[in-house]
Amino acid sequence: MPREPPVRVVRELTSRGYNAEREAVTLLAGAPDPTAAVERAVDTAPDDALTLTTEHVRGVLDDSDDEPPTENGTPADAPSEDATDGGTAAAAKTAEPDPPTSTESTPPDPGQTPSSSGGGDDEIQTKRTTSPVETKGVETAGEDTGSTASDSDANGSRSADRDTDQRSVEIEGDVTGESTGTGEYADFVATFRDRYDRLSKKLRGRVNHRPTDALDSMPGGSEAAVVGMVNDIRSTASGHWLVEVEDTNGVFPTLVMKDREIAAHVDELLTDEVIAVEGTISDDGGILFADDLHFPDIPRTHRPSTADRHVQAALVSDVHVGSQEFAADAWDAFADWLHTEEAEAVEYLLVAGDMVEGVGVYPDQDEELDIVDIYEQYETFAEHLKDIPGDLDIVMIPGNHDAVRLAEPQPAFDEELRSIMSAHDARFTGNPSTVTLEGVDILMYHGVSIDEIIAENPDEAVSYDAPHKAMEQLLKKRHVAPQFGGRTRLAPEKEDYLVVDDAPDVFHTGHVHKLGVGGYHNVRLVNSGCWQHQTEFQKSVNIDPDVATAPILDLDTLDVTVRKFA
C-alpha cells in the first residue's frame, strides 16, 4: 500500500473527533494499513481522551504486529481487498498527490535592485534561490543557502521529538474586550489626544519644541520648532507647500519651500499624523519657514530580538474560504508540507486576517461565492485548519472580509466564530496586535491602510507590486492607519490602539494579496500574499494576486524563506 500522507490521517482522526500528537500521526501514516490502524487507535482510546498520544499509538501498532496471520498472510483483522475497494491498486489511484513545488524562477524583485540593501542597518539581509521548492526572500540576491529539494525527503514526516515547553506566545495591544467608543465627539477627541501625547513624546527629545501659542509671540527671525498633528496640506500659487500643524494649544502654519530638499517629504505626509517641524519664524511672526521635517520613525539604532533556538513561524494571510477562487488544492499542499520533515522547525502559524471571503464586501460579490452563508464559510475554513499539524501554535487576527466590525482597531472574533474555528486551540486576537514569539515581537496588522498609503504617495516605488514599501511608511509614521476620514474606517476609543509604541522586530501584514519581503531600520517586513486566485472584481481594479505563498520566518535570525504551493 502506498504511504499514506499524514494530512489524510489527520482528517480521518478529526472526522472522529480526535487530535493526535505529531509523532502519533507519523506512526499511523507509516503503518502497513493506515485506515485500519486509525480504526484500532480510536476504538481503543481512553474514554476521556481527545488527543491520541504517541505511546497509545505505539501500543496499538505493536499489538497488531503480534496478531496471527490468516491464510493469505494478512493480519486477521485487516480489511480484505474487497473491503478496501480493490486493495492497493485502488489505494494507489486515490492517493493524494505530492505537494506542488514552486515555479522554476524566483518572484520578481518588488521595488529594489538586488544590490540596494547593501547589508546596512536599514535592511535585513534576505536571500533567494532557484530551488523548485523554496525561494529565499524576495528583495536581496545572494548565494544559495538553506534547504533545497535534495536536502531532505519532502515526503518524509516531521518528527514529534520537540520540547514544547520552550515555546512562548504573548499578546499585547489587543482591543478585544476593551472597546469603549460610542461614536460621540468626546471619543474622537480622546483618540486624537492620546495619539498626539504618545507620538509627540518620541519627537520632543529631537527638537526644541515650542507650543503653537508660544510661536505667536516669538520675534521674527527666531529659530523655532513645533510638534503637532498635520491639520492641512495645500500648495500655494507659487508651488510651495503650506502645512498646518496642530497641538493641544492651537494651529500654526509652516511653509515648505519647493526648492528645499525636504519638499520631497511633503508627498509622504497624511493628515492626522504627528510630525515635528524645525525652522525660522517669519518677520511678521505669522508663519514658520521649515528647514527640516521629522517623523516619529523607527530608530536606526534599533536592534531586533531573536529566539534562542532555531524555530520557525509560517506567516500567511487572506485565505478567503468561500470564494469560487479559493486555492483549496494549494492550501492542502501547504498543509501536507507542514507535516513533512522539511517543515519540522515550523512551530507557529500566524494568520493576518481574511480567513473567509465574507458576504457583501464588494459589489456583486455574491456572483463569485462558492459558499453563500457566512457561518458555513467559517465551518469550511475550520475543516481546512484541521489539516494543519495539531501541535502548531496558531494565532489569528481578523481582516476586512471577516465577520467583525470593519472599523479599526478590530476586536477578535466573537465566541460563536471562535467555537467554529477551535481546531488546535488557536489563539484569537484583535487587529492590530503585537504577538511575541519566544522574545520576537511581531506586529500583526491586516493592512487596509496600505491602500491609502499607495494611493496618496506619488513615489512609483510605493506600489502594490512592493507592499513592503508602503509598510515602511507606516513604521516611519509609527501608526498603522494615520489618516482619519480616508479609505480606512477608524473607530474612536479611549486610547489609540493603532499607534506603534515600541519598534517591532517583525511587521506582518496582508490585505493587498501581493508578496513583499523587506527590511526597514532592522525591522523585518512581510506581506504574505494570499490563497485566492484572481476574481473578476480584482481584474476590474487591476490586481494580479500572488497566490499560495507562505513566507517562513526564522525566529533565530529573522531570515525569510518564501514557499510557493501553486
Image: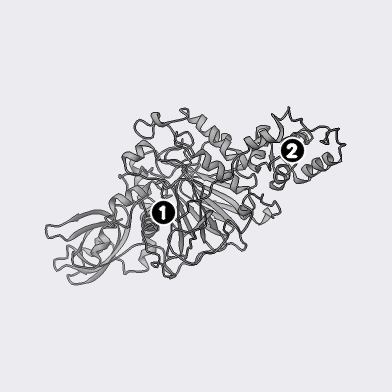
In terms of depth relative to the viewer, which is nearer, 512 or 245? 512
Q: What residue did someone put label 1 on?
A: 499
Q: What residue did someone put label 2 on?
A: 33
- x then y, percent, for residue 491: 38, 42
- x then y, percent, for residue 2: 68, 41
Q: Secondary structure at mark 2?
A: loop
User: Is residue 28 found left or right of 343 in the rendered image?
Assistant: right
What type is the residue that disc 1 sits on? Val
Quadrant the N terminus occupies: top right
Residue at position x 66%, y 57% from top? 166
User: Is residue 521 found left or right of 226 in the rendered image?
Assistant: right
Q: Secondary structure at mark 1?
A: loop
> Which mark is in front, 1 or 2?
2
Residue 464 circle label: none
- x then y, percent, for residue 246: 27, 56
Residue at position x 34%, y 40% from top? 539
In terms of depth relative to the viewer, which is nearer, 422 or 43? 43
CA gap, disc 1 and disc 2 = 55 Å
